């Protein structure tokens, strides 16, 4: 899993306005969620 695509802080700041707002529930790390989505798109589910 060393080929994961990590987003820089500047990239995360640019896409932050498109994330849904938290409504009383603690949010998970959005960066980890995005990396997981990109990983599945790139490698597919096995």
Image (cartoon, rainbow, N blue to C red):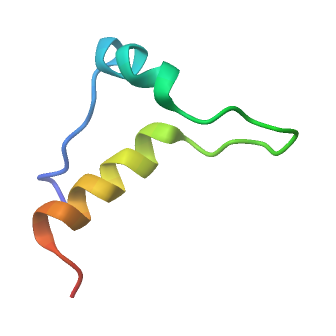
Residue at (44, 50) in percent of width and height: 33
Question: What is the tally of numbered marks visible in this picture?
Answer: 0
- Residue 7 is situated, as x and y percent measured from the top left of the image, at 27, 30
Left or right placement of residue 35 versus residue 1 in this view: right
Residue at (22, 60) in percent of width and height: 39
Residue at (34, 57) in percent of width and height: 36
- Residue 31 is situated, as x and y percent measured from the top left of the image, at 42, 38
Determine whether 2 is above or below 30 in the image: below
Q: Nearer the viewer, residue 32 or 17?
A: 17
Q: Quadrant of the N terminus?
A: bottom left
Q: Nearer the viewer, residue 2 or 29?
A: 29
Q: Quadrant of the C terminus?
A: bottom left
Left or right placement of residue 34 versus residue 20 in this view: left
Residue at (69, 42) in percent of width and height: 27
Left or right placement of residue 40 versus residue 21 in this view: left
- Residue 12 is situated, as x and y percent measured from the top left of the image, at 38, 22
Determine whether 8 is above or below 26 in the image: above
Q: Residue furthest bottom?
A: 46
Determine whether 23 is above or below 3 in the image: above
């Amino acid at each position: 899993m060393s080929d994961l695509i990590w987003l820089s802080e500047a990239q995360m700041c640019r896409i932050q306005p498109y994330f849904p707002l938290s409504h009383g529930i603690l949010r998970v790390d959005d960066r980890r969620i995005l990396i997981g989505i990109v990983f599945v798109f790139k490698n597919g589910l096995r």
